[in-house]
Image (tube, rainbow, N blue to C red):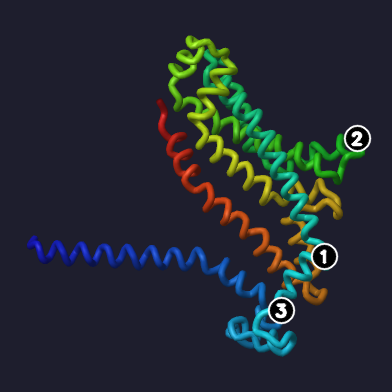
Amino acid sequence: MSATTQQQSSVLLRTVSLAFILLWLFAAAFPFLWTVWGSFKVEADFFSRLSWWNAVTGPATEAQTGSQFTGAGYHGAWVINEFWRAAGNTIIVTVCVVVISLTFGTLGGYALARSGFRYSYWILIAALIFRAMPHITLVSGYLLPFFQLNIWGHLPTAIIVLVAINQPFTLWMLHSFFLSIPKDLDESAMVDGCSRFGAFRRVIIPVMWPGVVTTGLFSFLLAYNDFAVTAMLLSQDNQTMVPKIQSFMSSIYQAGNVMYAVAAVVSATVPLFILVLFFQRQIVSGLTAGAVKG
């Protein structure tokens, strides 16, 4: 094969690869971008049965508001329906789940990774079985004691169940990260005068910080996006964002509720994009570190 032919093949391959990447990015980003665009329209435009082009030009939006864009959906969701309460409840639940899960996960994962006893393997197997159980079965098991203790409907009930669901995952993931760290680091720190916990806190945790961030992000996503647990265990006044969005959709025949749901979806999704972009380096390095065993 001549040099000219090889160069043409290389150019063709790069062109095809670039076209595929652009097509994939468009397919991945379009639904969210379209939802963001539509959140500034009225229902008659965004869900028009006459033409989808009305969602772009916004004739009904301009007729009703005097402009092609409106923030009525966000005002209705956040102010009229107090979506800010659901956002605040989501923050409380998510932060508590992440902190509790990481605290017990790091301690338990480190202990199991450094343990030479056979029971550590069976603890991990039991955790894996517990993680594989459908979430709804765990929720139904908690309902009776929560009713008897009169704590159903409050945020701590959802936090307890979400931590129970998430803990096996954090235990497995952090255990994998700890296995990738040589035991020589612990022993060197203890020779220098550190206790076992001192070596864990001063030496091991700084080394595996990317793994903690990665595990914390997955724990965050579990609590942030949960619907089944929070919908069954929280009262109407203590709803988190996802069940609140569902409540908008369950009453679509009320004027404006569909657009309230669209605006709420955008409001709930934007923080996830910001979080992933902010921690992208730690996520990549953490996943890479967890995949390599020392």
How many neighbours does mark 1 have within 10 angstroms: few (below 14), some (14-19), or many (20 or more)? some
**Left-right relation of 24 to 225:** left
Mark 1 or 2, closer to the camera? 1
For label 2, the crowd category at 10 Å Cα-Cα, with few meaning under 14, some 14 to 19 and many 20 or more, is few
Mark 2 and mark 3 lie on one chain; the one further toward the N terminus is 3
Give the class, few, some or many, for how many residues have Cα within 10 Å of label 3's Cα (few <14, many ≥20).
many
Is residue 277 positioned above or below 150 on the image?
A: below
Residue to which mark 1 is pinned: 81
- The amino acid beneath tag 2 is Leu
Measure the alpha-carbon separation of dots 1 and 2.
30 Å
Q: How far apart are marks 3 and 1 (CA)?
A: 17 Å
Q: Residue 43 carries which label?
A: 3
Residue drawn at x 85%, y 44% as measured from the top left: 154
Q: Foreground residue, 267 or 11?
A: 267
Residue found 43% across the figure and 38% down from its top = 288
- Give the SS element for disc 3: helix
Q: Where is residue 165 in the image (x, y as percent from the top left)?
A: 68, 37
Q: Counting residues from the N terminus, which is met first, the one under dot 3 or under dot 1? A: 3
Q: Is mark 2 on a helix, strand or loop?
A: loop
Foreground disc of the pair 3, 1: 1
* Residue occupying the point 81% across, 46% down: 233
Side (left or right) of 111 relative to 70? left
